[in-house]
């Protein structure tokens, strides 16, 4: 496989680590990789992107916003890594997101603000700032080959800015061209990531890139949308007509193990390379770490050996054999056989017939479970209408019986692997045994706990679908079983039990008990939902929605990841936005959700809405059919709104949508339809 780009992506997304970065450069040199991308803490407001590692010159007045110690670290570590890479002929790139500007830029230069209060992208000061910070960056890091550009997950959401002179596609083209032209003038490269989950957005961005230059490399993920072992391959590759394609992949497992579980990606890599080669990419870049964890010195490093084999035209099976023989000479054959089974077991553990069924490789919290339709998908008559990235195309859940069978097979298979591994104790080097034990034990306990999770959710949904009181006893029993299994895993693994891990591995704070948090919340949610449903059913209603409940249904649609649920004093609710609101809005401060509710055709229907907010004096837009209503409130506490919808087309349902349109985040408790 003769490729221009044979790449590794590192420090994803954590502070630069000098020792690790230098080791990675050496590894790349010794294993046939010619391209390194550094992520760095891209979501950190202070340290993230090229802004967080670069002292400004012309705009030096904003350098006080930076972490000077981190800037110094980067100037030392990144430059030493770039020098070393350059001596080996390896190119190094830095990840960067736009639009990013200092927090005080708007107040210092108010002329860039439009009447809505957003930055006007075309203001000359915006161009000047972008051009200058790029020049400053490459002055500080002269051996850096270029930047990897993403136009999402920023404090200033380029595509969502209001009252702009340019359309979204023109904004993409305008900002990207500023960066492309500046890089080219400096003899540097720009590689772009579309990072779009909606086909129309993807086509728009691909067109903008093509119009800037057909030399502009477009890098995109090899799975459709985000990382998965079961998500379809990226059909959007076909939208890139004239620009070179670079393929981005994850072999560490951000969403499928994150290094806590033993995993050899034999089938996954074979299938994805075969698919991608149909589009003649100029190369591949592989994420090899996440949140401080990495594969070096680990059994999962076998995936780097497989990747190296594909990129350099070597025999994959020979490289696998060589890896195990070098690393575990007294148990090479046996460990290889165990690892061959891990991919299938993990797929059956953390997916539901291909459906995303975990939270970034951790045990999911309740909000995540509700937002990713885990309850809806486990109802006997599943009626999902999400159209979101984590739903496989043309998804067929299959029977619940088959889902349970998969979970049983995963548990049985994981226990078998653990027992076979323990039998190798005297043949595995002592310094490796603990790490291997943790991996195979985590796989076993993970398979058991996901089996329990599936059955617990089934009991929840079955009660509300059947009103069979025996389901409540089963529900309580599975909560107890899950708690006992958590305790057993903690006794065996301590803080190395992956369902206790912090989201960031290099965080020194105490491990977080995902399972303990979940069982407390799901029990609270169940009884609050039960009370709310019983109260609603005591009224004469045409339809009702308990928003934020596990059983809310009604063909829910929402903003991906930005329509949270909460359990509040007054009951369950759904947010048009994120629960952290202004604290964490680097990706998108606003959100929306909608339901399809029953109405009486050709009649006046009364829509009653119960809501409050996170933050004072909110405005909320409610759209019923095509009719928009702006709801406001000044008092604290839960407000009751009453809207009239006259159905005039003979339809027995209407979609009601809620949008966040102010700094406060609306929390909607119930929707009731009556005459």
Image: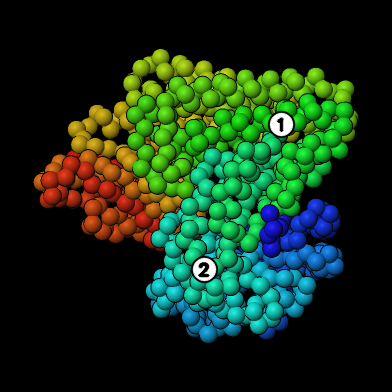
User: Which residue is pictured at 77% across the width and 39% down the height?
Assistant: 318
In the image, what residue occupies the spot 58% across and 40% down? 229
Residue 428 higher or lower than 625, as above or below:
above
Q: Residue 194: in sight, yes or no?
A: yes
Q: What element carries label 1?
A: helix
Q: Is mark 2 on a helix, strand or loop?
A: loop
| Among the 4 quarters of the image, the one containing residue 459 | top left
Vertical relation: 136 (above or below) 227: below
Tell me if 635 is positioned left or right of 26 in this view. left
**Direction from residue 486 to residue 85 in the image, left or right:** right
Whichever of callouts 2 and 1 sits on the residue coming sooner in the sequence is 2
Q: Which residue has dot 2 on it?
A: 242
- On the image, the x and y values in percent for residue 256 come to 62, 40
Confirm whether residue 479 shows in the render: no
Q: Where is residue 213 in the image (x, y as percent from the top left)?
A: 54, 75
**Which residue is the site of mark 1?**
339
Q: Is residue 589 above or below residue 371?
A: below
């Amino acid at each position: 496989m003769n490729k221009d780009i044979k790449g590794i992506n590192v420090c994803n997304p954590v502070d630069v680590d000098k020792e690790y970065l230098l080791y990675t450069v050496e590894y790349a040199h010794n294993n046939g990789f010619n391209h390194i991308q550094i992520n760095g803490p891209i979501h950190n407001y202070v340290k993230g992107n090229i802004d967080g590692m670069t002292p400004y010159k012309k705009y030096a007045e904003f350098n006080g916003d930076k972490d000077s110690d981190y800037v110094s670290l980067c100037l030392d570590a990144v430059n030493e890594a770039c020098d070393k890479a350059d001596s080996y002929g390896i190119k190094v790139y830095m990840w960067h997101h736009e639009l990013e500007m200092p927090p005080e830029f708007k107040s210092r230069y108010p002329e860039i603000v439009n009447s809505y209060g957003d930055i006007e992208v075309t203001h000359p000061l915006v161009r000047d700032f972008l051009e200058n910070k790029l020049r400053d960056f490459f002055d500080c890091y002269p051996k850096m080959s270029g930047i990897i550009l993403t136009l999402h997950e920023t404090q200033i959401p380029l595509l969502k800015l209001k009252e702009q002179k340019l359309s979204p596609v023109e904004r993409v083209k305008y900002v990207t061209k500023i960066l492309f032209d500046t890089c080219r003038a400096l003899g540097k490269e720009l590689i772009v990531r579309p990072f779009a989950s909606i086909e129309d957005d993807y086509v728009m961005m691909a067109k903008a890139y093509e119009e800037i230059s057909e030399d502009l490399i477009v890098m995109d993920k090899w799975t459709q949308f985000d990382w998965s072992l079961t998500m379809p391959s990226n059909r959007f590759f076909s939208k890139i007509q004239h620009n070179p394609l670079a393929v981005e992949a994850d072999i560490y497992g951000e969403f499928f193990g994150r290094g806590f579980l033993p995993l050899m990606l034999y089938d996954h890599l074979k299938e994805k390379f075969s698919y991608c080669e149909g589009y003649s990419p100029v190369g591949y870049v592989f994420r090899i770490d996440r949140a401080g964890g990495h594969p070096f010195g680990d059994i999962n490093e076998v995936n780097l050996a497989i990747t190296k084999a594909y990129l350099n035209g070597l025999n994959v099976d020979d490289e696998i054999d060589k890896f195990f023989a070098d690393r575990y000479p007294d148990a090479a054959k046996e460990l290889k056989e165990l690892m061959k089974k891990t991919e299938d077991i993990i797929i059956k553990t953390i997916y539901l017939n291909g459906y995303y069924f975990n939270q970034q490789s951790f045990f999911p919290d309740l909000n995540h479970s509700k937002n990713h339709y885990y309850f809806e998908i486990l109802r006997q008559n599943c009626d999902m209408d999400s159209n979101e990235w984590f739903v496989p195309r043309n998804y067929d859940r299959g029977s619940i019986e088959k889902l349970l069978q998969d979970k049983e097979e995963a548990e049985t298979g994981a226990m078998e692997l653990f027992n076979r591994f323990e039998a190798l104790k005297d043949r595995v080097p002592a310094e490796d045994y603990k790490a291997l034990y943790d991996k195979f034990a985590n796989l076993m306990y993970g398979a058991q706990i996901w089996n329990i999770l599936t059955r617990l959710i089934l009991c929840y949904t079955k009660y509300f679908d059947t009103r069979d009181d025996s389901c409540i006893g089963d529900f309580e029993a599975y909560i107890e079983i899950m708690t006992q299994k958590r305790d057993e895993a903690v006794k065996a693994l301590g803080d190395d039990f992956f369902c206790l891990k912090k989201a960031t591995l290099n965080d020194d704070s105490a491990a977080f008990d995902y399972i303990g948090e979940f069982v407390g919340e799901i029990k609270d949610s169940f009884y609050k939902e039960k009370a709310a449903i019983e109260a609603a059913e005591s009224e004469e209603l045409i339809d009702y929605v308990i928003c934020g409940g596990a059983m809310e249904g009604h063909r829910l649609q929402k903003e991906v990841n930005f329509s949270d649920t909460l359990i509040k004093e007054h009951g369950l609710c759904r947010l048009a936005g994120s629960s952290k609101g202004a604290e964490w809005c680097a990706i998108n401060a606003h959100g929306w959700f909608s339901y399809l509710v029953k109405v009486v055709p050709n009649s006046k229907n009364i829509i009653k809405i119960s809501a409050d907010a996170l933050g004072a004096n909110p405005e909320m837009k409610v759209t019923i059919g095509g009719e928009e209503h702006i709801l406001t409130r000044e008092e604290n506490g839960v407000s009751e709104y009453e809207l009239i919808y006259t159905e005039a087309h003979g339809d027995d349902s209407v979609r009601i949508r809620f949008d966040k349109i102010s700094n406060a985040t609306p929390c909607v408790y119930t929707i009731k339809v009556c005459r």
